Each structure stands twice: as C-alpha cells, then as structure tokens.
Image (cartoon, rainbow, N blue to C red):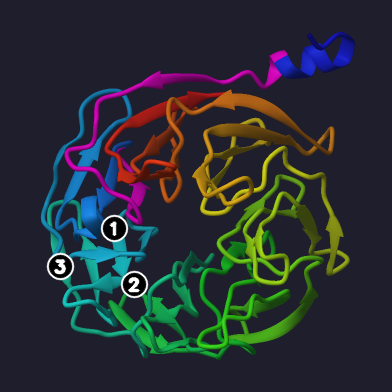
C-alpha cells in the first residue's frame, strides 16, 4: 500500500471506467471523430475475420450508438480529420478489393460526398494533420504489399482539392505527426517497406515554405507509437515497436522545439504499441491499452497517466477489457471515450464492439 506522496499521486490518477452501450458492429482500425455538435462519428474499420465494415455510426458517449450515413467505400487504416468548417475529411485507407485507396470523402453534416480530387498516391497507415490555415497535410503511408511512401499532399478545403507538396526525406508509414505551437508539423519514426527498417529519424514540415527539414533523431527507433503535444510545447513520444529491439517499447522521449532535441522521458510501466494517448484538460496524458509480445503476444488492459509537472508516469487502473487498435476520443465533459479494438491472447484474436468512458 503506497504511503505519503506516492499515495496522494496514486489517488490523483485513479481511473473510473463506465461501461457504455455497444457499437453497432465490432470493429478495429476505424476512426472516431468528435463532431462540432458534440457527437462522435465512427467510420469504417475491420470486423470479425477481418471483414470490412461499410458504414458509420454516431453516439454521444453516454448512450447507444446508432447507424449513421453510409460511406462510399469500406475503409480501414484511413484518416479522419475534422475541418475548420465542421466537415469531416476521410482519406485513403485499405479498401476492397484488397488494395490501397487514393480516394477521399467528405461528410457535410448530412451525407458523405465522394470527392473527385484524388491524392497523388494511394496510401494507408499515413497521417493527416489539420494546419493552422485550415489545410490538411497528408504525409507518407503504405501502398499495401508494395512500398512505403515519401509522397505528401495538401488538402485545400475551399477548392475541395488535393495537391502534391514536398516529399519526406524518407518514405515511412506507421509514423506520427504532431502540430506544434508555431504551426510546423513534427513527423517522427515509422517503418519502411520492403526492407522493414524501423526509423529513428524525424522531420519538420513548414506550411509557409511547404518544405521538410531534418529534425534530428529520436533516442529509439519506433513505429505505431504515439506523439502528444503538451501544454508547454514539448511533444511526448511513447511506446511503439522497434525492429532493432525486436519488440515493443516501454521507453518514452520528449521533443523540445526550442532546442530541437529529443531527450529521454520516464519509462512506462508496460511496453506497448497500437495504444492511445489523450491529452486531458488538466494537461496530463492518458495512455490506454495497446499490444505487447513481452511474455507472449497479448493485448494490454492497463492505463497510465503522464504528469508533465512531475515528469513521471503513474498507474491509472485498467480498461474494462484489454484492447489495441481501438480509438480514444476526448469528450466535451473531459471523459475519454474508448471504442472498439482487438483482443489478442492465448485463445486467439477477437474484434470487439464494447465502449467505455474513462474519467481520470
């Protein structure tokens, strides 16, 4: 039983998880977007036996999810970006008949509109970052079974059009993209195909010049990690998978835009990839779930909270059930909505439709 300051810290990060209504269908590798009216839209993903989930569903985190408008293409490992005007941009992804998409769709509040404009390359496991001027930077990605991409695009909402922008120095997918306070975008890590090399490199995209510049090297190579902008302007990079290490990481690092350096952060209690990281209203970061092969392949149920003021992680309870490839959405009331995901364990793998609201 912790005592003194440790006890106070443990109490401060205690997590309550309220079970919610289920999703209409089980799914993972989907997207979950908070729309302007406060509802959460779930799009696409893969279900049991890796079947494509065609359609969307909408809920508010407190009640049942109900079927929403149909998207034009069944997609997984795509991106969903809420634009400045409240519309939702769905881009790329893994699609039927088992290929990678160049196409995109726009949800206008009532229906999905299939955009005539296409990205410069098909891509999945890419990133989409809303820039300060309202454009969206689409970076990198994977062309299924073929190659990792260095190609990038800018989506211009006024014209509903994609146009090529500068290329990454290295093709990468499963990387992370973080909008910094000064408007630049930090690209970290990822992996390359077909050589399957995990990257330590980082790059900075400047929307003013539409150019990438090197941003140094992380302390660990990693992909399928998280990168979260903290209130003080630094970026918390957590977990992921490393080919060099041969598995998942418990390490974290902090990028400081002022110095342009990566510095070691405190380790997490568990190694994990395909987890989620959510910036809470009080400035802490909630790490939830994930996958680890340490001790045998399994999905992680534990949660941790990073406190930038203390510079430390503290345990924050557990999810109602372990999940990875789930999604976490910060709700207007400060709760974190967890939707869907996959469970891997000794009994095989299962896709889930359960949801929960976490309240750190």
From this view, report whether residue 149 is shown above or below residue 58: below
Residue 157 — which label?
2
Residue 110: x and y in percent read 13, 52
Residue 113 — which label?
3
Residue at disc 2, secondary structure? loop
Residue range in magenta is: 11-37
Residue 68: x and y in percent read 14, 46
Inter-mark Cα distance, 2 to 3: 13 Å
Given contact means CB atoms under 8 Å apart, are the residues at marks 2 and 3 in contact?
Answer: no
Inter-mark Cα distance, 2 to 1: 9 Å
Residue 87 — which label?
1
Q: Quadrant of the N terminus?
A: top right
Mark 3: few, some, or many residues within 10 Å (few <14, many ≥20)? some
Magenta residues, dominant SS class: loop
| Residue mark closest to the camera, 2 vs 3 | 3
Residue 34: x and y in percent read 36, 44
Residue at disc 3, secondary structure? strand
Residue 19: x and y in percent read 35, 21
Given contact means CB atoms under 8 Å apart, are the residues at marks 2 and 1 in contact?
Answer: yes
From this view, report whether residue 9 is shown above or below residue 311: above
Q: Quadrant of the C terminus?
A: top right
């Amino acid at each position: 039983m912790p005592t003194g300051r440790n006890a106070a810290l443990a109490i401060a990060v205690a997590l309550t998880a309220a079970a919610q209504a289920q999703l209409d269908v089980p799914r993972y590798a989907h997207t979950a977007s908070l729309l302007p009216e406060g509802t959460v839209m779930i799009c696409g993903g893969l279900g049991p036996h890796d079947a494509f989930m065609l359609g969307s569903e909408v809920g508010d985190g407190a009640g049942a999810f109900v079927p929403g408008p149909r998207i034009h293409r069944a997609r997984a490992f795509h991106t969903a970006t809420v634009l400045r005007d409240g519309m939702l941009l769905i881009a790329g992804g893994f699609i039927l008949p088992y290929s990678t998409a160049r196409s995109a769709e726009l949800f206008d509040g009532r229906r999905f509109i299939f955009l005539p404009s296409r990205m410069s390359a098909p891509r999945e496991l890419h990133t989409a970052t809303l820039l300060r001027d309202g454009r969206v930077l689409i970076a990198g990605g994977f062309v299924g079974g073929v190659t990792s991409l260095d190609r990038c695009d800018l989506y211009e909402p006024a014209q509903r059009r994609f146009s090529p922008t500068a290329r990454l120095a290295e093709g990468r997918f499963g990387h992370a993209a973080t909008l910094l306070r000064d408007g630049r975008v930090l690209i970290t890590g990822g992996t390359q195909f077909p050589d399957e090399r995990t990257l330590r490199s980082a790059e900075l995209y400047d929307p003013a010049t539409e150019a990438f510049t090197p941003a140094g090297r992380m302390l660990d190579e990693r992909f399928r990690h998280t990168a979260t902008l903290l209130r003080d302007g630094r970026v918390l990079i957590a977990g992921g998978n490393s080919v060099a290490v041969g598995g998942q990481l418990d390490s974290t690092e902090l990028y400081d835009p002022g110095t342009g350096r990566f510095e070691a952060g405190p380790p997490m209690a568990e190694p994990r990839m395909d987890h989620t990281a959510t910036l809470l209203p009080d400035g802490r970061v909630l790490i939830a779930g994930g996958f680890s092969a340490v001790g045998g392949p399994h999905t992680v149920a534990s949660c941790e909270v990073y406190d930038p003021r203390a510079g430390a992680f503290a345990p924050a309870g557990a999810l109602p059930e372990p999940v990875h490839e789930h999604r976490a959405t910060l709700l207007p009331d400060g709760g974190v909505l967890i939707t869907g995901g996959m469970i891997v364990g000794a009994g095989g793998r299962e896709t889930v439709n359960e949801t929960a609201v976490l309240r750190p």
